[in-house]
Image (cartoon, coloured by chain):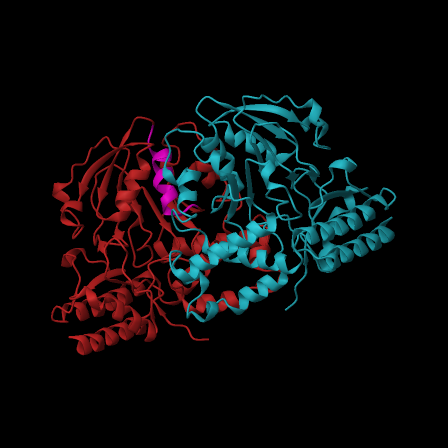
Chain colours: A cyan, B red
Amino acid sequence: MSRLWNFSAGPAALPQPVLERAQRELLDWQGCGASVMELSHRGKLFTGLARQAEADLRELLAIPEHYAVLFLQGGATQHFAQIPMNLAAEGASADYVVTGHWGEKAASEAAPYVKVNLAASSKGESYRRVPPRETWQLDERAAYVHYTPNETIHGVEFHDIPDVGDVPLVADMSSDILSGPIDVSKFGLIYAGAQKNIGPSGLVILIIRRDLLERASRPMARIFRYADHAANDSMLNTPNTWGWYLAGLTFEWLKEQGGLAAMRERNAAKATLLYGAIDGSGGFYRNPIELASRSRMNVPFTLHDSALDADFLKESEAAGLLALKGHKALGGMRASIYNAVPLEAVQALVAFMQDFAKRHG
Amino acid sequence: MSRLWNFSAGPAALPQPVLERAQRELLDWQGCGASVMELSHRGKLFTGLARQAEADLRELLAIPEHYAVLFLQGGATQHFAQIPMNLAAEGASADYVVTGHWGEKAASEAAPYVKVNLAASSKGESYRRVPPRETWQLDERAAYVHYTPNETIHGVEFHDIPDVGDVPLVADMSSDILSGPIDVSKFGLIYAGAQKNIGPSGLVILIIRRDLLERASRPMARIFRYADHAANDSMLNTPNTWGWYLAGLTFEWLKEQGGLAAMRERNAAKATLLYGAIDGSGGFYRNPIELASRSRMNVPFTLHDSALDADFLKESEAAGLLALKGHKALGGMRASIYNAVPLEAVQALVAFMQDFAKRHG
């Protein structure tokens, strides 16, 4: 066994104790004589697990009773399309605030189902910051306002929940859900692909204010309708049972760590350490994002000379630091430091970066 | 470790060697320092695994080059809706041949997207058989003909591929894919939820003749368009990487077993043994399906006195035989005997059934 420090943007590192437990019980879950993957999703054993996972998530995020919690499939990308199908009547419009690649994609996948109003975008500034709230062109008749609290590729994060009045606020929290406490009651809908801060890929968690479940009516199959999923406890059809199980183990682990307030502290410490190393490198490393909009989860950075990139990647991997290559849209490097990445991993990365800079500076 | 014999209809038993290998390499996949669940789907390690799984599936089913193979999400149920979205122009009709619960459901989820023509149904006969081909009311202008080669709940199976002329034949093979060789070239589209004969839930395999990829044009998000998935090697967004991995291990295992011809023999032997025990019980056990339409994968049966059902379930579980309870729509019992259920499991079930009948006859 030689586990390395994994900075993958997603599918991303999972907590070591979660993986160890999943390994132990892979062939025989809780003495039932079968793997958790081999159980009917409608049997008592699995529904008990499923309900416990939901209860733990509700506790961690303090989700109010008037919100439904759904365990779905399709990745955030599918829900880019399903959200307007469910929340917008035909012919309605929705506001999109775009601060990076994923917000752009959310708007483009929504376009067949809703009139997309680009209420704000920082594309013209290469997504270097969250556009100031006073510049947003919101429409009070919009079906909803969509935004991406943390942009995984560009490394831009909102540090406050924007006030959008009475229009339901919809957030793609794929890369920052569970990184700290949030006030769920400020949102109409929160959704997240699991593969960054929750569990394996192929699972989506969606939290929706119940009054929005019956919002739009347009012809569509039941399988696309959130109201039907809610009425069937996310078992309208066979869910991703392995994903649900691992998400449940992650929620338990988060509770053992002290919950989301504790995670917020740890994530702040990790981000502070890494940005400190970048900013303190005398220009050897650079992060392009405005200070107030920097992501605590995804830290893109470039080397002062991109001719060194290949060496950086080769040497970092040899030093046991995985998946630091930046997204192809930006080049350079990116370290994703989600909940499951411990402070020691960031310390090891910073030590490597400093040594590399010394040797190549 | 006490693994029991698992007759679950789905999520269902997985091959023991597949689970053991997944357990061994759960924390460190092929010495890469991370779990297979923690790898980027776009990295060389995972794309290598993904391509190998596809190649093995192509070899097992002898899939011709002019078919695309997709690894998707959403369960068969989502594709009940996505298939008409992709194969039928707006206003077009499609023929549905319904031989059980899942065919009914396929037709109802399709209805928002295509005019459903119920070309044949055995519902009036309680789904006791496949309706004779000469009674089908097919429309040669139909966008496609949909049928369900094996009905998981009712235990009804087609033993030949129906001839539907030049109209593309679409088959939901969720519960019999890989149970024996098939002639893929007879189909326009084959799809299957993984959780019966392939791997864990949350993965769908879809095999589509490439000329059908551009069939219909209607406004929809890219994520729903099979052509976009095919053009992106099923990585339009993050796939279910764990499901893909386990499917790949299952394909390897099937090749080691001698491929699908060998599986057909084994499955025939298992089904013959179990139906023999039912038919030879002097009426203590009954299966309602016409002989020529009996499923080799899902064997529903009733006890002559339903007052004995509770005892049968309790005693069978105590004897190490799991998940024999029938679907609530039919009551009684059901034994699902997919590829991963060995002959020894069926022998143990038959021995229990004979003993139970002796004690309660």
Secondary structure character of the magenta stretch overall: helix
Residue B117 lies in what quarter of the image? top left
Q: Tell me: residue B270, above or below residue A15.
A: below
Q: Is residue A27 visible?
A: no
The residue that appears at 56% across and 58% down in the rendered structure is: B36
Q: Can residue A254 be seen in this view?
A: yes
Residue B255 lies in what quarter of the image? bottom left
The residue that appears at 18% across and 36% down in the rendered structure is: B138
The residue that appears at 61% across and 46% down in the rendered structure is: A177
Q: Which span is picked out in magenta? A: B74-89
Q: Tell me: residue A96, above or below residue B323.
A: above
Q: Where is residue B266 in the image (x, y as percent from the top left)?
A: 28, 67
Q: Where is residue A107 in the image (x, y as percent from the top left)?
A: 55, 30
Q: Position of residue B129 (x, y in %)?
A: 16, 52
Q: Quadrant of the N terminus of chain A?
A: bottom right
Front in this rendered view, residue A343 or B41: A343
Count of labels in the image: 0
Direction from residue B262 to residue A243 in the image, left or right:
right
Direction from residue A301 to residue B336 in the image, left or right:
left
- Magenta stretch: residue B115 in it? no
Direction from residue B7 to residue B359 in the image, left or right:
left
Q: Position of residue A205 (x, y in %)?
A: 52, 46
The residue that appears at 46% across and 61% down in the rendered structure is: B249
Name the residue furthest front: A65
